[in-house]
Amino acid sequence: MTDTVLRVRDLTVSYGTTTAVRHADLEVRRGERVAIVGESGSGKTSLGNAIAGFLEPGTATVTAATLELDGTSIVRTGTGPRIPVRTPGLSMVFQDAMSSLDPVWTIGSQLVAVLRATEKVTKRRARADAIDRLRAVGITDPERVMHARSYELSGGMRQRVMMAIALSSKPSLLIADEPTSALDASLAVGAMELMVDLAEQEGAAVLVISHDIELCRRFTDVVVVMYRGEIVEQIASRDLAEARHPYTRGLLECIPTLQSARLDELPTLESVRARLEGEAA
Ligand SMILES: Nc1ncnc2c1ncn2[C@@H]1O[C@H](COP(=O)(O)OP(=O)(O)OP(=O)(O)O)[C@@H](O)[C@H]1O
Ligand SMILES: [Mg+2]
């Protein structure tokens, strides 16, 4: 087993004439937690979806010198229309657990379907596993939840269920696109903590896309900063305070604090960058 879970070299994503990601290089090691941060439109989702294989050839063009998961190439070839297919070893969770879970099917049947797609087991065995999985994500009444549909659960429960489903295929990489941005700040911390803890228990590395650089600093090992389609800095999360790149500094200084809340004008990425460039000149 290689120590590198994800290896990306020179990945570019374009939508017609718009280039959303330019020449991205990225590596995620086994069990590592990596955050992708950057302002809106910087290409985070495009990068995550390109890795997960969630971009349709009809809309987006993805090129990469290397795109490997667990040492195996996951570059998708072919140009015809294609629905997203599951890449073994990779799971993805999205911002909104409500829309990611199917309202028609019970939680149990969705979980059983994923378990049986991953491993050849009887329905009975898969149901027993599903109950164990729900218990493992902190659901105390798994039997009831198995029979429930997504809209019958609270937001927090839905998130746990979504994590149970995502991790039940035993991925080596979990990609989470803005998993906490639909939640208010106090819930976001708990949700992020739950995600990284569960992924760690299951031995999955995490690639989390987020606007919240402070949350990423607390819960990840490495922060990757994107700006206008490019990865401009990759830095150990614990060293983030010492980041020198103007865009990274800009993102850090845009975190509202009690001091900045008193200013007439809140700092923006552009204003911080202009000031830092002025200071450097
Ligand atoms: N399906 C699409 N068709 C055309 N352009 C797109 C498409 N999806 C994204 N883009 C463009 O690609 C660029 C990057 O978008 P992307 O959604 O990857 O950014 P992001 O960093 O995830 O932004 P946000 O923080 O708002 O989610 C933007 O300019 C966006 O307008
Ligand atoms: Mg996005």
Image: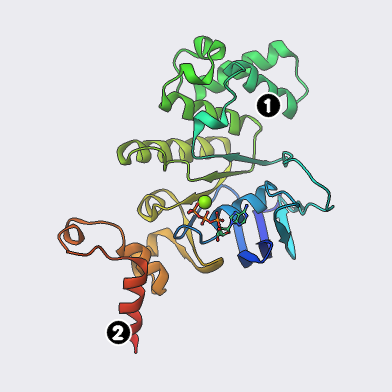
Q: Where is residue 78 in the image (x, y as percent from the top left)?
A: 84, 52
Give the structural element (helix, strand or loop) at label 2.
helix
Which mark is first along the chain, 2 or 1?
A: 1
Disc number lying in front (1 or 2): 2
Q: Name the residue under label 2.
A: 279
**Position of residue 76 in the picture relative to residue 280 (left or right):** right
Q: In which quarter of the image is ligand 1?
A: bottom right
**Marks 1/2: CA distance?**
54 Å
Please name the residue shown 42% across and 27% down the image. Answer: 155
Q: Residues within 10 Å of mark 1 (few under 14, many from 20)?
A: some
Amino acid type at mark 1 = Val
Please name the residue shown 35% across and 69% down the image. Answer: 242
Q: Using the image as rendered, state which of residue 274 and residue 173 is in the foreground.
A: 274
Q: Using the image as rendered, state which of residue 184 and residue 264 is in the foreground.
A: 264
Please, is residue 226 above or below residue 125 in the view?
below
Q: Which residue lies furthest to the front in this view?
A: 17
Instruction: Say which quadrant the C terminus sits in.
Output: bottom left
Amino acid type at mark 2 = Glu
**Position of residue 197 in the picture relative to residue 18 (left or right):** left
